[in-house]
Amino acid sequence: MPEYPPFAVTADLVVFTIRDGELCVLVICRGEEPFAGSWALPGGFVRPGENLDEAAERELIEETSLGGAVAHLEQLGSYGGPDRDPRMRVVTVAYLALVPELPVPVAGGDASDASWRPVRELKPDSLAFDHARILADGLDRARAKLEYSPLAAAFCQPEFTVADLRRVYEIVWDTELDPRNFHRKVTSVPGFLEPTGGTTAGERGRPALLFRRGEATLLHPAMLRPVR
Amino acid sequence: MPEYPPFAVTADLVVFTIRDGELCVLVICRGEEPFAGSWALPGGFVRPGENLDEAAERELIEETSLGGAVAHLEQLGSYGGPDRDPRMRVVTVAYLALVPELPVPVAGGDASDASWRPVRELKPDSLAFDHARILADGLDRARAKLEYSPLAAAFCQPEFTVADLRRVYEIVWDTELDPRNFHRKVTSVPGFLEPTGGTTAGERGRPALLFRRGEATLLHPAMLRPVR
């Protein structure tokens, strides 16, 4: 085997959820140099014996105690510039995770110092390392996937209304959508939504039909973002 | 910095082109153990001053002498199972490259022992390491991207006919497409194709209109694969 430069390999996580009408990301406030006081994406070293996906799943459970509540985890991309960590050569394999809106804060408890922060409040220079770029790439991926995949439902509870789903699209895309137009489009994509047969209790106004995610893995036709 | 297990990091390439009506991938016959005599994807160690994309670009130039002929290079994903290389812990960052149909063989000359092989002839157990999985993932990515991006044009010469483009779709998707239906669809996607104003010489039959790739980065509506 020829000589090769040794690297550390980490798995970092871009974990999105929706809280209080805002797209939020899980971050940790760094206590040590480099970047003490900056926000960082949660993550850690890949251990001997683990593959990359396993490392990401372990980090996600450790940081969030979410367990089964994670609706989606996918590899986002790898980042390995020679200057990304001043201490050593580190390649990070970044993952994108989508988590349903949580009834109570889960991260930020005793087990972790991670907290949910609205994405729009995180200025790029408040993030450690190249995490601003990784976060931006995660946001791009999530926004694009909402167009051609049913992943918006990953932010919802298992049963949801069309209005719940529209709110996810509006928050992730940071835009307003016409309710009637959205309803017509979303219910005409084969396999996207499946009626549960139930309705909301209808505390205010009329009861709304409840849906669960259907079996489609790609949306045809796609749900296109409004041009801005 | 806590203790971490050292890794080697490589950039490996899934390079596709079309030759003699077949989808072909660039492979190297391994001369040494492990996997002596097996086919492997070209690639190599990421060097000290390089980022990941730079390593992939360097490997591509070294292995193919293609230079500017590469029409597309993107990160495909990272692979880092603990047993993927029996000698050491290696994470590879795999890239997908698409190359236009080449008038003459480029790889396989003095500078490289790489050669183009039809994908359909490469049995999974003839490939070294986990390269069969990486190749399969690259093929899935290329097939999916032809649906919603204009990347089919990356296999074509700068000026091409609708029939040339249809042949790319048919070869990559391994299917037959109705010529009139394909023509109607492909010419109705805004920004996909731009007429050059020229036509083919028309040695056989009528001259055909020539196109170049337009400015669209996503196809709306998408070009859907036939359901099989």
Image: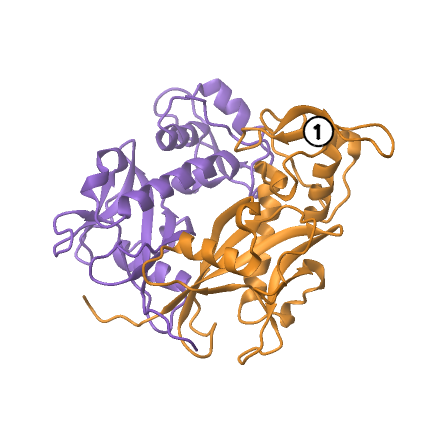
Chain colours: A orange, B purple
Q: Amino acid at mark 1?
A: Leu
Chain to which the residue tagged by mark 1 belongs: A
Q: Is residue B134 above or below residue B199?
A: below
Residue B12 horizontal side relative to residue A171, left or right: left
Residue B111 horizontal side relative to residue B149, left or right: left
- Residue B54 in the image: state x and y as whole percent: 39, 64
Q: Pointer 1: residues within 10 angstroms few (<14), some, or many (20+)?
A: many
Q: Looking at this rendering, what residue extends furthest in the right direction?
A: A205
Front-most of residues B165 and B134: B134
Q: Is residue B163 above or below residue A155?
A: above
- Residue B35 in the image: state x and y as whole percent: 15, 51
At x 53% / y 50%, what residue is drawn? A67
**Residue wearing tag 1:** A210
- Report the number of numbered marks: 1
Front-most of residues A104 and A193: A104
Q: Looking at this rendering, what residue extends furthest in the front direction?
A: A110
Q: Is residue A114 above or below residue B66?
A: below
At x 37% / y 63%, what residue is drawn? A47
Decide if residue A177 is in sight here.
yes
Q: Is residue A126 above or below residue B217?
A: below
- Residue B91 in the image: state x and y as whole percent: 33, 59
Circle 1: element type = strand
Task: Residue A5: name its quadrant.
Answer: bottom left
Quadrant containing the N terminus of chain A in the rendered view = bottom left
Q: Looking at this rendering, what residue extends furthest in the bottom direction?
A: A33
At x 59% / y 65%, what residue is drawn? A132
At x 36% / y 39%, what residue is drawn? B139
Front-most of residues A137 and B97: A137
- Residue A48 in the image: state x and y as whole percent: 32, 63
Front-most of residues A228 and A14: A14
Decide if residue B197 is in sight here.
no
